[in-house]
Amino acid sequence: MLDLTGPVTFPPVHPLVMGVLNVTPDSFSDGGRFSDAERAIAHGRALVAEGADIVDVGGESSRPGADPVAEADELARVLPVIEALAGEVRVSIDTAKPTVARAAVAAGASLVNDITASLHEVAAETGAGWVAMHMQGQPRTMQVAPTYDDVLVEVLAYLVERAEAAFEAGVAEVWIDPGIGFGKTPAHNWALLAGLDDLVATGWPVAVGTSRKGFLAAVLAEADGAPEPIPAGDRLEGSVATAVAAAAAGVGLVRVHDVAATVAALRTVAA
Ligand code: PMM
């Protein structure tokens, strides 16, 4: 029973909040506003001030249809930003390339955020944590025709297999992430969100990223009475609502662009 006779003293516990810092000229959601290092570092610091527990630095867009980025370009984008921020906050590196992950950890990142769920050996080698995200196909073509017999069953089985492989390889911190929007229709995304408690029940800590994603657009447009899908920058309510729902399902980490609003909502619900 809660003691309701005095001030509430329990700490409001909520999932870790990972703030997105895309250092790319073509990110779908922040439109390349942070494509030079100084502005990226300043934005990273702002995310920390807003309450981010982790800043997720990425130098290659994984937006549907995005072109791959050369390794040297990706390194040049992310390394100065990681070096500047690593002493101030936990930094994760969002990359699909083992060389970039390795260099990022050497520069101070301590979590490899892996949309390909294939870099656990780098995490094992370097002692970093690892986020294994599910994706069907490759970013360039993944939204052409995503198909599953049972999206929740398939994604869950895949992630548990990946997590066990990483754990056996010696990775001490392993997260699983259903990869909202990565080779999924809106119906697949909603089914995965509705099934988050099944992912949580695997016992592996669960991360999820819904922030500003396309599947939110249609439902927000309907709520607004707007005739057109809502642009990425205007999906705050859906982003926060899905982060809160994920927290209620027991997710341990939410990856978001709008850190202040998400932290405020999560703290409120936790209190
Ligand atoms: N989504 C994006 C990029 N990286 N990483 C994880 N672990 N989970 C996600 O859902 C995820 C990710 C795409 O979003 P962005 O282009 O806004 O960064």
Image (spheres, rainbow, N blue to C red):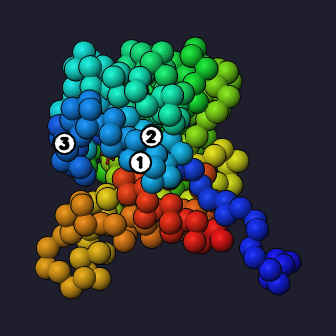
> How far is the residue under mark 1 from the one under mark 3?
16 Å
- Classify 53 as above or below 224: above
Mark 1 or mark 3, which has the lower sequence index? 3
Q: What SS does tag 1 mark?
A: helix
Badge 2 amino acid: Val
Q: Provide the residue designation for mark 3.
A: 32
> How far is the residue under mark 2 from the one under mark 3?
17 Å
Circle 2 packing at 10 Å, graded few (<14), some (14-19), many (20+), is many
User: Quadrant holding ligand 1?
Assistant: top left
In-front residue for pair 171/58: 58
- Classify 145 as above or below 161: below
Badge 3 amino acid: Gly
Circle 1 packing at 10 Å, graded few (<14), some (14-19), many (20+), is many
Badge 1 amino acid: Leu
Q: Residue 49: x percent and y percent?
A: 45, 49
Q: Tally the marks.
A: 3
Q: Residue 237: x percent and y percent?
A: 37, 71
- Residue at 30% across / 75% down in the picture? 219
Circle 3 packing at 10 Å, graded few (<14), some (14-19), many (20+), is some
Q: Residue 130: x percent and y percent?
A: 55, 31
Mark 1 against mark 2, which lies toward the viewer? Answer: 1
Q: What SS does tag 2 mark?
A: strand
Residue 34 in sight from this viewpoint: yes
In-front residue for pair 127/265: 265
Q: Provide the residue designation for mark 2.
A: 55
Q: Is residue 253 left or right of residue 113?
A: right
- Residue at 76% across / 68% down in the picture? 9
Mark 2 or mark 3, which has the lower sequence index? 3
Residue 198 in sight from this viewpoint: no
Residue 25 tag number: none
